Image (cartoon, helix red, strand yellow):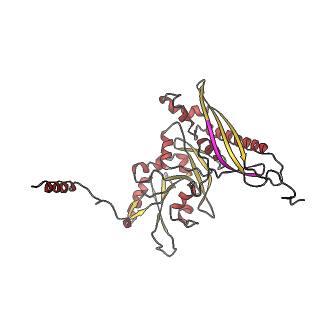
Amino acid sequence: MSRRAARYLAILCMLLFLPGCWDVKDIDNRLLVTAIGIEPAGSDRVQVWMRFPLPQSQDGAHKDFFVIRQEGGTVIEAIDQLRLRLPKSLDMSQNQSIFLDQALAKKGFMPYLEFTIRDRTVPLDTLIAVTTGGMKSIFERSNPTGELSGTYTKLFFERYAGGTSQKNVVSLWEIFKGYYNPLEECLVPVLAADSDTLFRVAGNAYFKHDTMLGMISPEETLIYEIISGKMSPFEIETAEKMNLKILDSSANIDTDMKNGKPVIRIHAKLTMTLMDSARGIDIKAKHLEASINRLIEQRANKVFRLTQEKESDIFGLGNRYRGKIPPDQYNRWPKLYSGATLEFKLDSELKNTGLQLRRRPFINPSKDE
């Protein structure tokens, strides 16, 4: 046998061991899940909602999506029952978001999200949100701005689209990171049904382990964004009847241990610009900066008080103590955080004020004159 023939024979033998794609279903034999909702159904049961996009309008209502729901003792049981009802394979590899009812979040999210670990097809970047008011209005209404099913929620939170600093975005992998890391907790957006759009942000929920303990307002979420370095340049803050845009932010965090208690000093800086006129108010830039500093510092102290009372370190400050407390003491961090001394100082700088800080009567006269 020639050398070339022996080579071809060896290649053919190796091909026999290739499994190929014999177990992969065609795309037209799969139903792609783009959104999952989980809510209580009574008697310790849950109801799972799923929304699938349709390739074209296939019914008289001209919908571009298909919705199905199923009760079960667990999420896995409900999903298995759904598979018995569907004519095609259930594919969660393209899922964009998971909505968890607030009542279940207060019990603990782990029993309701652990199916994503066991069913390894759910993407790790799936967006997570807590909802109030049930899943019906979210899943059965068409997207008001015309996006495909599943895309609306993604655009709602993403910074390149409709996302703002008040819309904190958290993915599936971040939820589990906060659960398994005792040095930090998660901050998850809370959505409420809206009559014009699908939903609106009602606030952001803070957790201890997997249990929702409370909620901070969208305005208070600004503190989290500044400290965590996620601040968006589109946030508008109002003070002294003026609208300001925050252009840039930074936070210097100094940590120490004194008498066994954490001492955390946060020095934040904001760069802002004036968005509209003073509406007839004569005010100096320094006075406006002091007003902003006072407003945000008061708001920060409130957020610290709320989260310390519940031992929920949403800022991840415990990660800065990895070299200051032994690893076998990490589980004590929630208690240490509740007794920590937290100091927050803000320095704001107003730029590009133009001629609007002081109303000029001959240019912009008051309507009352």
Q: Quadrant of the C terminus?
A: bottom right
Q: Is residue 87 visible?
A: no
Residue at left 58%, top 40%?
315
> How many discs appear?
0
* Residue lying farthest to the top in this orientation: 259
Q: Position of residue 47 (x, y in %)?
A: 49, 57
| Residue 248 % position (x, y) | 64, 46
Q: Residue furthest right?
A: 369
Give the magenta part as a residue range.
235-252
Q: Quadrant of the N terminus?
A: bottom left
Using residue 278 as the reference point, say whether residue 297 is left or right of it: left
Comparing 215 with 344, the one in front is 344
Relative vertical location of residue 231 with respect to residue 91 in this rendering, above or below: above
> Image quarter for residue 155?
bottom right
Q: Is residue 276 left or right of residue 97?
A: right
Residue furthest to the left: 1
For residue 246: magenta? yes
Q: Main secondary structure of the magenta part?
A: strand
Q: In front here: 157 or 202?
A: 157
Residue 101 appears in the figure = yes
Q: Position of residue 192 (x, y in %)?
A: 61, 56
